[in-house]
Image (spheres, grey):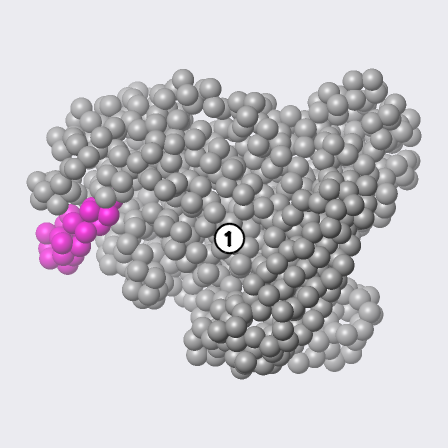
Amino acid sequence: MAKNVNLKKLISNMTLEEKVGQLIQLNAVSFSDSAAEITGPVQKWGIPAEWINKMGSTLNFSDANEMITIQKKHLENDRNGIPMLFMMDVIHGYRTIYPIPLGLAASFDPELVYECSRMAAKEAAAGGVNVTFTPMVDYVRDARWGRVMETAGEDPYLACVMGATQVRAFQGSDLSDKENIAACVKHYAAYGGAEAGRDYNTVELSERVLREYYMPAYKACIDAGVKMIMPSFNSLNGVPSIANKWLMQDVLKKEWRFDGVVISDYNALGELKVHGIAPDMREATKLAFANGCDIEMMSNGYYEHLCTLVREGVIDEKKVDAAVMRVLKLKKELGMFDDPYRGADPEREKALALSPEHRAIARRAASESAVLLKNNGVLPFSKDVKKVAIIGHFADNNEIKGFWACHGKNEECVTVAEAVRAKLPNAEVVTAYGCAPLWNDKSTEGFAEAIEAAKNADAVILCLGEPQTYSGEGNSRADIRLPGMQEELAKAVMAANSNCAMLIFNGRPLVLTDVNECPAILEMWFPGSEGGNAAADLLFGDSVPCGKLTMSFPKHVGQCPIYYNHPNTGRPKWTAEDVHQAYASNYIGCGNRPLYCFGHGLSYTKLDYEAMELSDTKMSAEKPLTVKITVKNSGSYAAKETVQLYIRDLFASTVRPVQSLIAFEKIHLEAGEEKTVTFTVTEEMLRFYDASCKHVSEAGEFVIFTGYADHKYKEAKFFLE
Ligand code: BGC
């Protein structure tokens, strides 16, 4: 079928069943040839073979070979010759895995994010993927939620930048280019607002807070041209997203004019019954379809009821045609009618996977995502060190790719011990396991060996963290300290040898309060395929840490949700951190501040913020403000620094956050070099949602500062006229 396939004509020739087939998504197992493998929906819902041939898309297949096999078989049986769409969660890499998104965002480097996403797009396209369920731009404040690992953290502006960058990188400027794939922004809306950080939990938020913090990143992705959107599982103010008219119709379709494809999340229609919103799948189908769900992923509402609902006149067939048109339009834009196999190419898939070029990108990304939380001078270690002890579960462990690692394999990740041995061929490198990072494992059996190794070493690397399965979907935690006996292990090892640095491998901010006496702490996140190499580069000074936290690390789990951009109270705490202040908004026995806050991240070099100059003390919509910030590298390492710009609106008609990031720029500074970064502050950047949810700016005084949350290196004031 040619490029100029007439979609209207095509749809007019389709039966109702064929149209509905385009709106159903089943997993790849459903298309398997072998009867033994027929499990999942086909078995559960008793879907007959003639329906299987009508299905418009699939998810979760294994590789280019499987894509080609399924597509070929499908086309042999589909009288309309409409190719299927192949979708997958390519979240932080396809086969070459780069850091989890929360880590990658800590690089504060959109160019790096672009490069990583391009790499993933190329590998995935060669693997037969046409659509990725990325970017996930849910706004988050609660580290207990396991899916914070997929996000850009607690700043809405950063989430916009990272989300839009990924959309542009995956889709490119021409979707028919076989190295590009369509993106799907998710999970609309406010999935990250789950009460108590428990996955899938209820979300109750005012429209003002929703619009100001939670919604901007979905909108930014739509403005960047994202082709697909996935409504979230959660109920928002009482209504699950897929059935939420205000979200799906009033905002998404009417206000934002989104005209791409809407796909349900996995069995979200089925969950309408569990939520107690729909008594059965027929009602679930009516609700979801009426609110604009084009494709139903992995439930049986459309298959069982959509045709009947149309025949009974409950649903207008024209609406089905419109949904099918959106799906076919995407297939056409992807060039699937010209080449139904698109980029799927087993040879190329193999050649790209973990190629030296891709490993190099993953290594740089892992290094630039790491955040040096603390360093009293032990890091970087000297390369002349004779004896190194690497201790802890992650010492020689390749389980560091993290959740949602697509086709990444543990055995393809470089461990810390492997990398240190490669970097220091003349040193003696000893590893000791210590203990398991499991919440219910209290064994201290490995302590003696670990302590002995630490005592005999010149330098100790403690490799602690959470298992990969403690974050990601469904993996919330109530206690976010290092699980198991790791805190005790750390204390014992530190007592044995104080020339010690701690690496943390994890998918969320952790409470590190009880191990914070460690001389150096380097947050590695789940760094991916090149994690060990990146860690060794950082530990021995071949790269200089430059990541900055994008989510606060609480002092205590009881502080959650905790976020740097919180509104002021009428009784804010003003005394020293650890002193309880009566009749003020604070805790007894715990300060209000996190242990490590948003924007924090140290370097090996000394970075001096020399000056911040404003073009004026007044600005207006017509006359933006120019802010020049000069940073000098007074240390001895070349390094990168993220210059951050924050504002505080001192008086407004609604309570404003005590600080908000409005711009940032990452710069490279040679040792001794000085650079000036210029930011333009426009009136638009000062807007907020007022009590009636209008997006406005209000005249008045603002504080502007550079530094990071709660730490003002240079500060000034200006008026918006
Ligand atoms: C997740 C989505 C994901 C989908 C398909 C769901 O369980 O919530 O983020 O895209 O599965 O794998």
From the viewer's perspective, tell me whether residue 291 is left or right of residue 562: left
Residue at the spot x=43%, y=56% of the render? 220
Q: In the figure, residue 4 lies in which quadrant? A: top left
The reply to whether the magenta stretch includes residue 301 is yes
Considering depth in this image, is 485 or 254 the residue closer to the camera? Answer: 254
Read off the magenta span: 300-327
Mark 1, secondary structure of its residue: helix
In the rendered image, residue 127, in percent from the top left (x then y), is placed at: 40, 27
Residue sitting at x 33%, y 40%: 174
Quarter holding the N terminus is top left
Q: Residue at x 49, y 55 (%)?
A: 160
Magenta segment, prevailing SS (helix, strand or loop): helix
Give coordinates of residue 13: x percent, y percent.
8, 40
Which quadrant would residue 250 be assigned to in this image? bottom left
Residue type at the position of mark 1? Val
The percent position of residue 165, horizontal first and vertical second, equals 47, 47
- Depth check: give the residue in front, 670 or 712: 670
Residue 148, percent across and down? 56, 50
Along the line of sight, the residue nearer the viewer: 571 or 162: 162
